[in-house]
């Protein structure tokens, strides 16, 4: 039986298919930028109280306030990142030489004090087994690309890709500062329409969680990385910046950061 394309059902199906197509196309186009947009949203939310305070000092100058906040956040993040990036790249050659030496001679022996730790027998046994097999260590390092300085530099930073992501995050951050109130109001209306009055509690819980993650995990890991890097430098450890970055990354996992010190 022929289908009447002017019927209400056909129109609804066509409208739904069109919406699915638009939504899917939008997700496909924006998918490479989700990480940058997410970080822009997190930074805007965490620094929003400061933005509001400056906005009250400069009423009616939203564009200026948004630009000042964006430049301030970008500078605060960019200067340390550039310093760390160039320092780590310079330390990579040194680290590569050390890894090649380890691959040739095997791992160094564990400190005697570790052998007396509680429940350290299994760890010591595994370490002794690996230490006595320099060929296995060399094979594993080669598989991971840790014996090639070029591979280590690529691992230390895809500079162009990360710079582009940072630029997108900064660009989005300005508009989040500029239109954050309107965006939040629209989001609350949509959430309230779908979830009812309980949506406000959900939104507040998400906000508290984001702040807790940023301040409790990310900033703590960064602080540990900075302090560890300074400690490595004072102690005369080779490539202190590289080890500081590794400490910061590992510290994102609770209770794992001290492993790097060991």
Image: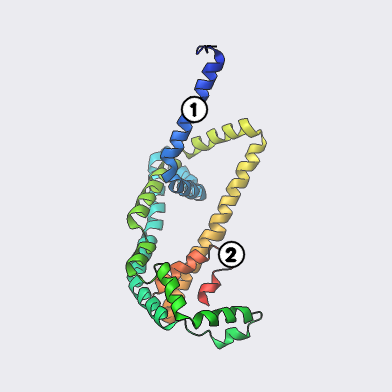
The quadrant of the image that shows the N terminus is top right
Q: Is residue 238 visible?
A: no
Q: At which x and y percent is residue 87? A: 35, 68
Position of 193 relative to 52 (above/below): above
Q: At which x and y percent is residue 13? A: 53, 21
Position of 12 relative to 229 (above/below): above
Report the residue marked by disc 1: 19
Position of 17 relative to 184 (above/below): above
**Element type at mark 2:** loop
Counting other residues with Cα less than 10 Å from the Cα at mark 2, is it few (<14), some (14-19), or many (20 or more)? Answer: few
Q: How many marks?
A: 2
The residue positioned farthest toward the front in the image shown: 1
Q: Are marks 2 and 1 in contact (CB under 8 Å)?
A: no
**Element type at mark 1:** helix
Query: Closer to the camera, 106 or 201?
Result: 106
Q: Is residue 78 visible?
A: yes
Separation of marks 2 and 1 at Cα, in angstroms: 43 Å
Position of 180 relative to 154 (above/below): above
Counting other residues with Cα less than 10 Å from the Cα at mark 1, is it few (<14), some (14-19), or many (20 or more)? Answer: few
Would residue 128 appear left or right of 101 to someone viewing this image?
right
Which numbered tag is attached to residue 195?
Answer: none
Residue placed at 48% from the left, 39% from the top? 180
């Amino acid at each position: 039986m022929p289908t009447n394309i002017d019927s209400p059902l056909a129109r609804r199906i066509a409208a739904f298919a069109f919406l699915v197509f638009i939504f899917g196309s939008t997700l496909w186009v924006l998918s490479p930028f989700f990480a940058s947009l997410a970080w822009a949203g997190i930074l805007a939310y965490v620094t929003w109280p400061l933005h509001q305070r400056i906005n009250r000092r400069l009423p009616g100058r939203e564009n200026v306030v948004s630009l000042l906040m964006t430049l301030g956040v970008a500078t605060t993040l960019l200067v340390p990142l550039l310093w760390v990036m160039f320092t780590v790249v310079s330390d990579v050659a040194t680290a590569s030489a050390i890894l090649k030496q380890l691959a040739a001679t095997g791992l160094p022996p564990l400190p005697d004090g570790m052998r007396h730790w509680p429940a350290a027998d299994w760890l010591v046994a595994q370490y002794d087994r690996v230490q006595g097999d320099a060929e296995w260590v060399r094979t594993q390092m080669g598989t991971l690309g840790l014996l090639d300085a070029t591979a280590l530099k690529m691992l230390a930073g895809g500079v162009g890709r990360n710079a582009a992501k940072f630029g997108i995050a900064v660009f989005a951050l300005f508009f989040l500062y500029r239109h954050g109130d309107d965006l939040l109001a629209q989001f609350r209306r949509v959430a309230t329409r779908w979830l009812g009055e309980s949506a406000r509690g959900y939104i507040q819980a998400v906000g508290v969680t984001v702040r807790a993650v940023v301040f409790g995990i990310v900033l703590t890991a960064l602080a540990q990385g900075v302090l560890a890097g300074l400690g490595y430098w004072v102690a005369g450890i080779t490539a202190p910046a590289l080890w500081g970055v590794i400490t910061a990354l590992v510290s994102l996992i609770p209770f794992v950061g001290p492993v790097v010190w060991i």
